[in-house]
């Protein structure tokens, strides 16, 4: 069975949340609450995944601007952000992207995230792999 994206369901989600550029801490907290709710949902729909990824990008953009001026989003920063949000430890990634040594090097920014590892991380975090490329 192939899952298909339902624009009407997505429209409903967008109407309920109404995502937009985050400009202050209150809006950021609201977006974080929605991300947290979606993150803990075990069987997210394609539409919920789309909203989840969109909110992560908006949150990261706000937080980079307000908490880390001058630092651009990188695959490494996205990995650290998602690990923090999902309370994932390095040991949880062993076997997902490689050995304990490889995971340590990737998490500590000493090794680039290859396309194969990006796809594995995308599957693991249930996000589009391009966030890690």
Image: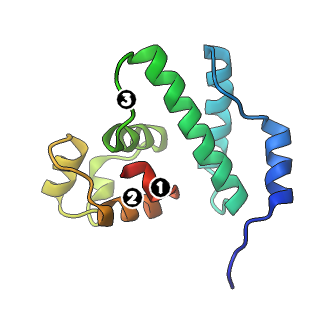
Kindly identify the residue that appears in the image at 85 percent across and 40 percent down: 15
Quarter occupied by residue 71: top left
Task: Look at the numbered discs 1 and 3 and tell me whether their residues touch, using CB distance below 8 Å.
Answer: no
Q: Is residue 100 left or right of residue 89?
A: left
Q: Residues within 10 Å of mark 2 (few under 14, many from 20)?
A: many
Evaluate if marks 1 and 2 touch, with contact meaning CB atoms under 8 Å apart: yes
- Across and down, in percent, residue 6 comes to 79, 64
Relative horizontal placement of residue 103, taking residue 128 as reference (left or right): left
Instruction: Measure the C-alpha gap from mark 2 to mark 3.
Output: 20 Å
Relative placement, left or right, of 19 versus 67 is: right
Q: Secondary structure at mark 1?
A: helix
Mark 2 or mark 3, which is nearer to you?
3
Of 56 and 38, the residue lying toward us: 56
The disc placed on residue 125 is 1
Q: Residue furthest bottom?
A: 1
Where residue 65 appears, as percent x and y from the top left, is 47, 18
Give how far across and how far down residue 107 sits, in percent. 25, 44
- Count residues near mark 1 (Cα–Cα under 10 Å), then give few for <14, some for 14-19, many for 20+: some
Q: Residue at x 18, y 48 (%)?
A: 104
Residue at 44%, 58% (x, y): give it: 129
Numbered mark located on residue 121 in the image: 2
Residue highlighted by disc 3: 72
- Disc 3: CA contacts within 10 A as few (<14), some (14-19) or many (>=20): few
Could you tell me which secondary element the residue under label 2 belongs to? Answer: helix
């Amino acid at each position: 069975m192939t899952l298909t994206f339902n624009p009407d369901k997505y429209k409903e989600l967008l109407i309920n949340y109404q995502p937009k550029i985050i400009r202050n801490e209150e809006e950021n907290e609201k977006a974080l609450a929605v991300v947290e709710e979606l993150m803990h949902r075990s069987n997210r729909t394609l539409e919920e995944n789309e909203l989840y990824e969109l909110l992560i990008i908006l949150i990261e953009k706000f937080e980079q601007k307000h908490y880390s001026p001058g630092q651009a989003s990188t695959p490494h920063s996205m990995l650290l952000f998602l690990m923090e949000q999902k309370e994932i430890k390095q040991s949880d990634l062993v076997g997902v992207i490689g050995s304990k040594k490889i995971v340590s090097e990737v998490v500590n920014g000493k090794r680039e995230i290859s396309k194969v590892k990006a796809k594995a991380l995308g599957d693991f975090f249930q996000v589009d792999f391009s966030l890690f490329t």
